[in-house]
């Protein structure tokens, strides 16, 4: 095989490895699936932040490991979502959902329908 062709193949193989790493990183951060809930009229997609909010509302405060296990959301995404201090608070290693009270000014964060 010609030396230039071998160099090109090596370069392509190297780029493939880099792209596979980037793909794994994106999958870890954003996951391959979209979470869904089934309301009374069909299936509607919800955000992962909404899924974590609902999980904490239903289960109460949870350890990060419990959120990961029960939600199936990738670790990086859970960490990113929990960084929103306007709606999540960590007390004694358990994560709590902070509900907005009526009349409080709205901060960044989703509207939660209960």
Image (tube, rainbow, N blue to C red):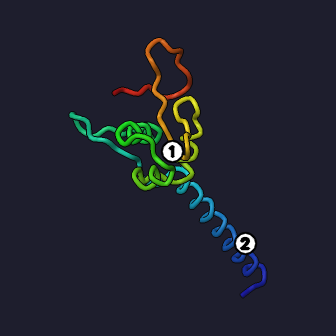
> Which residue is at a point 38% across and 36% down the rendered structure image?
57
- Residues 20 and 15: in front is 20
Q: Which residue position is annotated with label 2?
A: 11
Residue 9: where, in percent of width, then height?
Answer: 69, 77
Most extreme residue toward the top, as rendered? 103
Which quarter of the rendered picture does the N terminus lie within? Answer: bottom right
> Which residue is at a point 66% across and 65% down the rendered structure image?
18
Q: Residues within 10 Å of mark 2 (few under 14, many from 20)?
A: few
Q: Vertical placement of 42 versus 8: above or below?
A: above
Q: How many marks?
A: 2
Which mark sits nearer the N-terminus, 2 or 1?
Answer: 2
State left or right for residue 42 relative to residue 51. left
Q: Which residue position is annotated with label 1?
A: 94
- Residues 3 and 86: in front is 86
Most extreme residue toward the right, as rendered? 3
> Which residue is at a point 53% across and 35% down the rendered structure image?
88
SS of the residue at dot 2?
A: helix
The answer to which quarter of the image holds residue 41 is top left
State left or right for residue 60 relative to residue 93. left
Q: Residues within 10 Å of mark 1 (few under 14, many from 20)?
A: some
Query: How far apart are labels 2 and 1 at the CA level?
Result: 47 Å
Residue 56: where, in percent of width, then height?
Answer: 41, 40
- Residues 21 and 51: in front is 51
SS of the residue at dot 1?
A: strand
- Residues 61 and 6: in front is 61
């Amino acid at each position: 095989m010609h030396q230039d062709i071998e160099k090109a193949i090596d370069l392509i193989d190297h780029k493939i490895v880099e792209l596979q790493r980037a793909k794994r990183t994106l999958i870890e951060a954003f996951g391959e699936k979209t979470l869904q809930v089934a309301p009374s009229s069909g299936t509607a997609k919800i955000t992962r932040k909404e899924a974590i909010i609902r999980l904490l509302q239903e289960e109460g405060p949870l350890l990060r490991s419990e959120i990961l296990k029960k939600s199936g959301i990738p670790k990086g995404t859970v960490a990113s979502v929990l960084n929103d201090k306007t709606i999540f608070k960590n007390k004694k290693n358990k994560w709590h959902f902070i509900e907005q009270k009526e009349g409080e000014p709205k901060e960044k964060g989703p509207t939660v329908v209960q």
